[in-house]
Structure formats: C-alpha cells, structure tokens
Image (spheres, coloured by chain):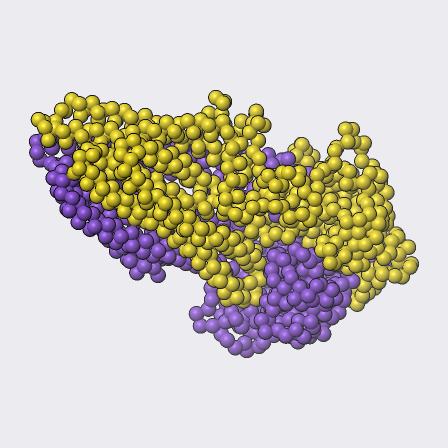
Amino acid sequence: MSGHEDPRVPGDRTGTDDEELDLAAPETRASGRHMAIGVPTARSADFGGSVRRLAQLLLAQRGTLLAILFTAVGGAVLNVLGPRILGRATDTIIEGVVGDGIDFDRLHGTLLQATALYLTSTALSIGTSWLLAGVVQRLMYDLRNRAEAKVHALPLSYIDKQARGDLLSRVTNDLDNLAQSLQQTLSQMLISVLLLVGVAGMMFAISPLLALVTLTTVPASIWVMRYVAKRARPKFIAQWSSTGSLNAHVEETFTGHALVKAYGRQPEVEARFRETNDRLFEASFGAQFMSSLMQPATMFLGNVQYVLVAVVGGMRVASGAVTVGEVQAFIQYSRQFSFPLTQLASVMNIFQSGIASLERILELLDAEEQEPDAEAAPHPAPVRGRVEFRDVSFSYDPDRPLIEGLSLVAEPGQTVAIVGPTGAGKTTLVNLLMRFYEIDGGSITLDGQDIRSIPRRQLRSSVGMVLQDTWLFGGTIRDNIAYGNPAATEEEILDAARATYVDRFVHSLPDGYDTVIDEEGENISAGQKQLLTIARAFLADPTILILDEATSSVDTRTEVLIQEAMNALRANRTSFVIAHRLSTIRHADVILVMEAGRIVEQGTHDELLERGGAYARLYNSQFAGAMLDVDVDLV
Amino acid sequence: MLSRVLRTHLAPYRRTLLAVVAFQTIQVVAALTLPALTSRIIDRGVLPGDVGYIRRDGAVMLALSFVQGFFAIAAVRFGARAAMGFGREVRSSLFHRVTSFSAREVAQFGAPSLITRITNDVQQVQMLVVMACTMAVAAPITLVVGLFMANREDAGLSWVLVFAIPIAGVVLGTIVSQMVPAFRRVQELIDQVNRILREQITGIRVVRAFVREPEETRRFERANEDLTRVSLRAGRLMSAMFPTANLLINLASVAVIWVGADRIGDADLQVGSLVAYLSYLVQILMSVVLATFMLSMIPRAAVAAGRIQEVLDTETSVVLPAAPVTVQPAPGTLEMRDVGFHYPGAEHPVLTGVSFRTGRGQTTAIVGSTGAGKTTLAGLIPRLFDATSGQVLVGGVDVRELHPDILWSTIGYVPQKPFLFSGTVASNLAFGKPDATEDEMWEALEVAQAADFVRAMPGGLHARIEQGGTNVSGGQRQRLSIARALVRKPDIYVFDDSFSALDLLTDARLRAALEPYTRDAAVVIVAQRVSTIVDADEIIVLEDGLVHGQGTHDELLATCPTYEEIVQSQMGERGAA
C-alpha cells in the first residue's frame, strides 16, 4: 500500500488500473455497461443511496484511505488524551492549594508532556487532511474526465433534447460545488467521528456515570440532525435544480439578446427571470436556514450537556467520587464531544448540497450511451466511397415518422445533390450517414459494408462535413483550419486557406492567421466563419464529402470562387450536396428531390427538367418574376 | 469593487442585518456567561460541597442556554434571508443591466461571459455573504465580549492572550496569504475547464464529424490536470489550517495553566476562574480562526465582485431619450442620413456615409460581400446599435429621440440567425405581438410558408419548441422567425438575410405572399440572392462599409461594376435554363 500513501499527481496515470474508479451503480453494472434502448437506468434517488455511491467512488482509492485511517485514528487518540493530561495538571494545582503548595516540577512535566502530545496530534491531523485533499482532488479529476468522456459517448439525441444551459450547469456548477463540498467536509467528518468515539471512550474511563450524563443529549442531537437534514434535502435539490433552470433562462435570453431588444420584450423576459430568481431565492433561503439551524441547535444541546456535567460533576466531587481535575477534564471532554457534533452538523449542509450536485452529475453519467462501436477491422481497405441507403426508415419522435423506405445509391466519385423543401429530411440524411442518429430500419452501407459494423471514428474520418451551423472553437484561425487535420503542415494549411478564399480575408485581419476567434466568433462575419469551416473540411481531405447548405451565408461572388475550389475538392470524392442555390448542384451526377421524408424524383438535371415535375417547378421558381427581365438584359 | 457590490445590494436588508447583529450579540453574551457561571459553581458549589448552590446555578445556566439557542437560531434565520436576498438582488440587477445593453455591449463581453458572471460569479460573492451573515458576524462580537469577560475573570492571565491572539493571526494569516493566490488560480482554471466543456457541447457535431474526440479529450485532460494540480495545492494549504488553529488553542491552554498555577500558588487566582478562563480562551481563539478563514474568502469573492461590477458599470451605448417623442410625424418612413458606425478602438469603420430614404410600399435592398457591414446597417434601425455619425430617422424622427416602445412596435426585425425561444409555436409568435389572435398567427404563418408544417406538428400552434428551436429544421426556424415579425404588422420590416436557409421554391412563394402583406409598409432587405431583390425600389451596394452603388437594378447594372459582378456570379444558375 506504500505506493498509495502519497496521492498521485494526476499527470501520473500509470498503474492506476487497479484503482480505476467505478462509477456505475451496482444495478447498472449488473446489466452491463450499455443498456438496452428504452430501459431507464435504475438509480436510487435517496440520500443514502447517493452517499453509498460516493463511498463506492472513494473506495477506489482504498490504499490512501487506509493510510488516512491510520493517521486519523492516531491523531484522534492523542487529541483525546490531551484534556486528560491537562486535567491531571489541574489536580496537581488543587492538591497543592489544599495541601502544602503546588508541586511545580510535576506540573511543568505534565504540561510539557501535553505540549508534545498536541504537537504530534497536530502533525497527524495535518497528514490526514493532506492525504484526503489528494483523494478528493483525484476523485474530482476522474469525475470531470468521466463527464467529458460522457459528452462524447452520449447519443446526439440526448444532447439535442437537453436544455444546453442545464447540461452545462451539471458539468460546471455542479462539479465545482461537489469539489468544494467534499474538500471542506470529508476530513472534518472523518476527524469528528473519530473524536466522538475517542472522547466517549475516555469519558467512560474516567467516570461511567458522568459519561452517561453527557451522552443523554446524544440521541437528541442525532434526532435534531436527522430532522433538519431530512427537511433541508429537498430544499438543496430544489436549489440546484432552480440554479439549472435559471442558467437555462439566462443562456436563452442572452443568446437571443438582439431579438429581445428589437421586439422590446425586456419586461417579459425580466418578469420570467424574476420568477425563476424568486424560486431560486426561496429554495436557497430554505436550504441555508435549515442547514444553518443545525449548528445553533447542536450548540444548544451542547450547552445543556455542559450544564448537566457541571451540576452532576459538582455533586459527585462534593460526595468525593471524582476529583475536580477530573470534572475539569470532563467539562473539556463534553466540549470536545459537542464540538465535533456541532462541526458534523454544520458540515452536513455543505455535504448535502454536494450530494445534491453529485446526484445531478450521476444522472448525466448514468445516461444511456450510444450503442457500442463495432470491432475495427484489422486492416481496413481504403474507402472507395460507394454509399447506399436501402429501405431506410427513421424518426426523431416515434409518433411522427419522418423517413420511410428511402433508398439511394451514390457511386464512388459521384456528386449526389439533395434538394427539396425545408423540413423534407435532407439534413436528417446527413445525421444518419454520419451515425449522429441511428436508423430505425433498413440499412446504410459504405462500400457494401453496413455502417453499423464500422467503428464510428473510422466511418467519420472518411467523411468530411461542412454544415450550415458554423462552429469554431476559441483559438487562432490557423488552429481552427488545422482542426480538420491536426497533422497538417503550415504549407498545407495555407494551401487550404488559399483554395477556399480564407487567405483573402485573413490578410485584412490585424493578426492574420494568429487572430484569435473569441468564444462566439463575434469578431468575424458569418460568411467568413463559413469559409473557415470549408477550409477545415478541405484540409481533412476526406473520401466522402457532405456539404449541407455550406454556402448559404457566403455572398454569391465569394461563392462562385468557393464553387471552383469545391469542384476541385469534389473530384474523385463521393459528395452529398444539400443546397438551395441550384448552381451548386446543376452538375451533380444524381439529383434527389425529397419531400416529406421520401425521394419523389431522382435523375440528372436535364432529365429532371424534361420530366417537368417537382424539380422543374423548383428550378423555375428562382427565375420567376423579374429575373426574366435580367435574362433579357444580360444574354 | 467588493464593498460596492455589497453596499448596493445589501442595502434593502439593512434592517435584517441589524437584527442579525443584535441577535448574535445576545447569543454571544449568553454563551460567554456560561463559563463564568461554571467557575462560580466550582468555587462556591463544588469545592465547599454546597449541592443546593450547584442546583440553583445549574437552573440559571440551563435558562441561559435556552436564551442563547433561541437567539442563535433567530440570527441564523435572518442572516440566511439577507444573504440569499443579496444573491437575488445582484442577479436581478445584472439581468436588468444586460437586457438594457445594446448588441454592441453584448458583443463586447460575449454572451458566455455574461452568463458566467450572472451565475458563477454571483455564487462566489453570495457564498461569502452567507458565511458572513450566518457565522462570521459572531466572531468580532465573541472577540470583544470574550476579552471583556476573560479580563474580568483574571486580568493577570491576559498577557497570554496578548501573545496568543497576534500569534494566531500571523500564523493563520500566513497560511491564508498562500491560499489566496492559489484559489485565484483555481478559479481561472475552473473557468478554462468550463470553457472547453462549453465548446465541446456546442460544437458536438463538428467534433464528432472530424473524429476529434481523442484530441478534445486530451485538451480537456490537460486543463483538468492543471486544475487538479493547483486545487491540490490549495486544498493542502487549507488542510493545514484547522489543525494549526487547534494546536494554537491547545498550546495557549497549556500556557494559561502554566501561568495560572503560579497565580494560584500566590493566591491571586481561584481554581474555578482558571477553568472559566480556559473556556474563554477557546472561544476567543476560535473567533480569530473564523475571522481569518472568512478573510481568506474575500480575495476570491473580490475577483468575482469586480467582474460583476464591470457589467453593472457598463452603460448601454443605446441611451433612452430623456424626453421621448411618442408621435411620428411621418409614420411608415425610414431615412438614413450619412450614417457611419465604428467600434470604439477599431481601426476601420464598419460603415461610412450611408444615406437613403424609403416609405410605405417601398422596398430597399442591401447587397454586398460578407463582412461589408450589411448586418450592422440593418441593426441600426431597431437600435441594436446606435450610429456613431449621421442619423437614422424612423417616421421622420431620429431613432434616438423616439420612445423605444414606439420604435420597436414600428419595426418587424428578422435576424440573420433565426432564433426561437423555448415554449410553443404560439408563444414564439406572440413574442412579436403579445395579444395576437390565433387567426392572426395563422395568417402570418401562411405568408411565411410555415402554416403547413406547423399544422403537421403535434399540437399545431401549441407544439413545443425546445430551447434554441433545435427540434425544427433550420429552414423551419427561419420561417417561424419571419412569421414572428409578420404577426405584428409593423410599419417597417427589416429582413437581415432572412431567406438564406429557404429553398428557392419556398423563397419564391414566400416573397409572392409577402408582397401584398407588406404593401403598406417600408421593407428593408439584406440579401445575397439577386432574385430576392431585383424588384426593389432601391438597391444599395455595400463594400467594406462604403456605398459602391445605389439605384434600381437596371441603373446599377449600367453604372456599378461591383453590382454587375454580383449579378454575374449568380447567372450561372440561369445559364442552363
């Protein structure tokens, strides 16, 4: 166990397998890591269950815990001996007062003994807290890593459905709160409990009667603690869930700020905020009061106990059963006894608040993960890029079927364009091909292999994607382009930037490629952001390319340039293009016209125009009205 | 900063706080009288063996304990109310301030930073106030009353305290001064970890598409390791704190007995007083510990308070008029006179010298490259920004003079990024017009080409919309966002590139339906597609914030090369027709 005495610095992750934290509740473990779809994860919602869960998490660091137990018990024993020795000093004084002068040599010897004892016990206490800090931080390190890994393991449907503010609140606010609460409570609780046991033992050793008198208040203390804790718990849960919903409301309002302003809706959003804010106030006031109540309550009981000891002790001294020094020691013991009780009571609220947060974190960690990946083929053949949808059906919501019996084939190198009214399910096809969502029926194959039998990362690394929703991370422009291929050289990055016309606008930025894009990317325009996402996909150099409205917020002159780059990019790649601007898709090998989740037409541009169906209507619509005049002018 | 935040937002709770101080004082005095009574019991009851005295004094002590307990609970109740009320006040002023901001201030801070400030930062400061109001208030009171009582018991022992208190202060202060920078660093690293998580969640599709989970995890792990390392340091410093405090108290007790024995030997002190003195000593030093601990929380809270105050001190650049004009002399008209806009400190202006005039039934279109300043121009009309030079006039009145309610009810604004609020379809439409009837809503939906899919949604108008509108497609979001503007039938429509996510057929249908619907209004359209704007009465061609051309489609084709380029770039589509 010696290897575990010093809690590992988190960077050192070697050899920790035996201590791998076990986050799965026993119930979920029994049924395997990945549960069948639709079975809600069984999880005890009671306080005791959550504490057991926490204990399980902590037990992963058994070695250190054992060391802690050793130092803590040592510290407690010495601490408990202290008053006994001081009591002996008092007796020496009293003997001196009653008899013929104080024996100062003996007194000073006793006091030096006490000093040595206190110094040692302090060293042990510091050791205990020191080791515990390591245990807590290691647990938090693992929990945070777990939460982060969980984000990547969750199905997209889970993340899409959650209010983003609430999800973020769990992985940030709740984790922080848990860390703070454990840091503050665990060592206190351990030391307090040990002190209680030690002091009780000591008291019985001195005077069983006085000990019993002292202990009479213990059941009352425990009752008060349980009473208050039980009432405080729902308030803590309410406090953290209102924190979540306040976060969600704030996030929504601040993100939609422009609309709130333009529509003059401040009064309404403020009214709603006031409501949430008031709820949070009520919940946190209740929680705070209930838990702050414990300290005065146990202190009161401590005082009652103190009075009882003084009175009964006084009578016993009067009857000669115990010495004054023993009573003095006893009074100090009774203080020492009520102090950890009070301490326990006051850290209880912090602990409870932490547990409420832990529950919200566990709820996230226990959420069902996406289906496990198939085994990777040992030597995957290079992807040629033949994609086939066969009789695919899918819906986000079982009550509203979206895609039914959809079939399509994209041969290697072909460009497949998908057009159709918004809401027809075009983006859904992308979600399915990327396995962001799993199909309900039928099959999707890549080079003849069912994509469900291909590990997700292998599938996705052969696909490049540019979405309408631009997302860039807080970093430099260079880093954002390199996101598509971390191994890319500077030259390759610049090539990609030039090919996608990023280079042009980057030169007008003060720091060029080192310009840092802030969190929301407010410092560059929507069109520029989109160019960056295109450059990113360009650099990734995938076999299959998905362009989902990739150029919708780029102006048309820039688009013409990008289009040329795209044409080069599309060569020898299977491409799926979803676009409104038909210029993008006119040269596609196959054009699919989708309506209400079905493919209603399919063919080349010329074939479809000839047919005079949905596509022809769509195509002609863009030249309706005045555009015809333009034709006359320009042709 | 901290004291300002505290002063301002605790002000409504002044009386509550006074009550807390009063109750705590009573509580402390009662608690500290107990050791004096004990010493009397020992000296007058125990040593002489007077059981009656012991009983009488015991009863008094019990009563006093009860009083102490009662007032302690009352103090905690009031303290909790004030502390949590403080949090509510701060959140409320912050929220109010941010909603009063213009788009410029929001962009300056960044929405995520504002969100952190109103949640995490407020939490930090509130934690300090909770500590102060429910526990730390008692510390100075205990110190003063305890010193007084101890001195009364035996002034000769006081020099132990004279040494013990400063020593405790210095030793604990040293630990705390080490902890403070560690905790500040912890906060920074927590922010960093949270930022990475936020990015990962918002960009989840891109992360997965590019198979960057391993790198993301590594990036997170690095931040997590830094955080853990620093937290561990801070936590270990903190772990030294309480045992050290305990040691100081114990050593002081030893010193008191050592010195006390001499005084008892010289008959200057009674044994009971020595025991009482020991109790006072413990209480006094505990209050020093508590005060030090409390002080240790201040720097961390001060950083958070500074961030809060920064928001509260930021004035919106869109100032409400002192004497707002409530009547428009020429409703339905919009004019820009030599309008310019630049961000403070920015090298180049976003807009320079834009002028145009439009009225009922007229359409003004704005085209240009990305980054040309189109969105800024559109945002000037509903005062998301204020022009930094020139004037924007709505209904013949400078928008800065117009009553905001009048201005906003005049304008139907559809932003570039369609954004829906969580709620229902109807609640989102009512955002435009709170008293809209269902008929009006359906009419707007019909025009926006959204009626069909809304009808197909479970619940129709009352179908749920998730936060951010994630449960409808991008094009549907855009159409609902258009319907939201239509439902209010404003005098002026501002469409900021609002048709980009629509397929051409829907776009064409929508524009056809829009035409009669907006006949009595002025329409400003920012657009990419020439087909969208070719009919406009006036087209403004923007390039790098400058007007490169202004006129009708035909005029511009003849005079403006930039416009011709734009048109040509879109003719590819038509070429095959």
Left or right for B551, reference A2: right
**Can the viewer see residue B287 in this picture?**
no
Identify the chain drawn in purple.
Answer: B
In x, y percent, where is residue B350?
Answer: 57, 55
In x, y percent, where is residue B48?
Answer: 11, 39
In x, y percent, where is residue A254?
Answer: 54, 56
In x, y percent, where is residue B59?
Answer: 21, 50
In terms of depth relative to the viewer, which is nearer, B204 or A590? B204
Location of residue A27 with respect to B563 vertically, above or below: above
Indicate the quadrant containing the C terminus of chain B: top left, top right, bottom left or bottom right: bottom right
Left or right for A141, reference A557: left
Splitting the image into 4 quarters, where does residue B143 fall? top left
In terms of depth relative to the viewer, which is nearer, B258 or B546? B258
Residue depicted at x 87% and y 53%: A602
Location of residue A229 with respect to B430 vertically, above or below: above
Identify the chain drawn in yellow.
Answer: A
Residue depicted at x 66% and y 40%: A31
In terms of depth relative to the viewer, which is nearer, A323 or A2? A323
In terms of depth relative to the viewer, which is nearer, B451 or A420? B451
